[in-house]
Structures are given as C-alpha cells and as structure tokens.
Amino acid sequence: MPGKLLVFEGVEGCGKSTQLNILHTALLKNRGLQQLQQQGIVPRLLTTREPGGTALGLRLRQLLLDEQGGALMASRAELLLYAADRAQHVEEVIKPALAKGCWVLCDRFIDSTVAYQGYGRGLDLALIDQLNQVATGGLVPDLTLWLKLDAEVGLARTRQRGTADRMEQADLAFHQRVQAGFEVLSQQHPERIEAIDAMGAVDAVASEIFAVVEGYLQQWYAPNLTA
C-alpha cells in the first residue's frame, strides 16, 4: 500500500514548522498508527521541507531565502529554482518514501508555488501548473493542512523572531496576494485542502490539526484498524 503525503501550507508566520513537528510527535504515540506500523503498512514517518529537503535543496534554499544574496532575483528565476528544488526532492526523498508506505510530512509543496510565485509575483498560473507537473511527475498531496492566518498577523509574528529571510522581507501587499492565493486554492481543491484556524494558541491549533488527521487516518485505513 503506498504511503501518504501530508503537506503544511500557509503565509509567513502561520506556524507550519511548529505544527508539523507537534503532529509528528503526536502521531508517533497514536494507537492507530502504531497498529499500522506493527502490520508493516506504515513503516515510518518522515518529515521534510521545501526548499531544502535534499543536499541540493539546501544549496537552493540558501539562494532563494538568503536575506541579501537573492534580493535582486528575477521572479522567473525564483520560480525555476523552486521547481528544481521540488524535482530533486520528489525524486530523491518523497516518492521513494511513499513507495515504501511511509507517511511524509512536508513543510510546503506545490500550493506554495502557486500562491507565492503565481498570486504573489503575478507569474502565469498555467506555466506554474506545468512546472509543478514536471517537477512532481503529477504527484499531489493526499492531505494539505492550510494554516489560515491573516498575512499582517503572520508578518508581525516573524518580526518577533528578530530576523527575516528574503521572502519575509517582501511588502505587505505581496503577502496579502499570497494569502488570497491560498484562499483560491482552498476553494478549488476542497477534496484535499483542510483549512485550520491558525489564530489561536499553539496547543489549540495542534488539537484541531490532530483531529483532522485522525479522521483521515480512520478513513484511509479503516479495514486495518481495530477498536
């Protein structure tokens, strides 16, 4: 049985990375997932991210997010670098893990490219769809957890960290367009995108995410689970 790809998406400061790690820890203790592991159906959980999920990706991440080195990067160059990172990531990490039945928890994937480079940068959405198809070989997430948060609130959270990468340094209007992009994607793909209210406390958001994922686990593996 192939594995499952669970992706965390959202604007800057929405808490994706934090919530991904919390979910990973919670799933390791989940009775249902432990049953599946004992049966060899889900051999392991894998956490990864884009950009930067491979050795090549780490080098591309530095180019893409360095707060100074990539300041003058053209939008199309940025798009192609993200596509290159994804192509390597899918080929080297994601597809092999899914083929073994693993669950892959990924921080950003195809929707981020649509939201950031499409809606944020204003690049052609059809071109972005083609590049995503090439980079992934048609792979789409089984579940996308969209941490829904106002862009201005998210940017305020990032400023509290004291440092900002190249993306975070973009103006508010850019991030509001990105936010609007995620809104559109959620409407276009309700079969896989679950909106999570990210305004609340970390624990409350984590509980909502876990409840959603638990529901999908039961749906996907019902015949293999015992009460």
Image (cartoon, rainbow, N blue to C red):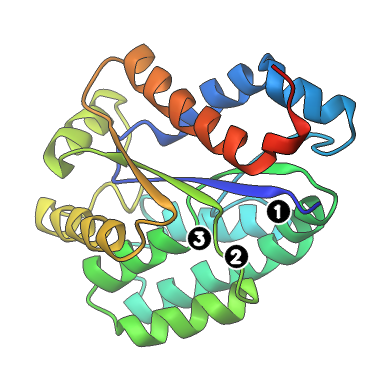
SS for callout 3: helix
> Which circle marks residue 85 in the picture?
2
Give whichever of discs 2 and 3 has the lower sequence position.
3
Give whichever of discs 3 and 1 has the lower sequence position.
1
SS for callout 1: loop
Marks 2 and 1, how far apart at CA: 8 Å
> Which circle marks residue 46 in the picture?
none
In the rendering, at what x and y percent does residue 53 appear? 65, 50
In the rendering, at what x and y percent does residue 108 appear? 48, 51
Question: Label 2 amino acid?
Answer: Asp
Q: Nearer the viewer, mark 3 or mark 1?
A: 1
The reply to whether dot 2 and dot 1 touch (C-beta < 8 Å) is yes
In the image, is 157 to the left or to the right of 24?
Answer: left
Q: What residue does disc 1 label?
A: 54
Residue sitting nearer the eye, 88 or 160: 88
Could you tell me which residue is drawn at 23 percent across and 58 percent down?
178
In the rendering, at what x and y percent does residue 186 appear? 29, 56
Q: Is residue 31 above or below residue 191?
A: above
Question: Label 3 amino acid?
Answer: Leu
In the rendering, at what x and y percent does residue 1 appear? 81, 51
> Which circle marks residue 63 in the picture?
3
Q: Is residue 197 above or below residue 180?
A: above
Give whichever of discs 2 and 1 has the lower sequence position.
1
Q: Quadrant of residue 184?
A: bottom left
Residue sitting nearer the eye, 53 or 108: 108
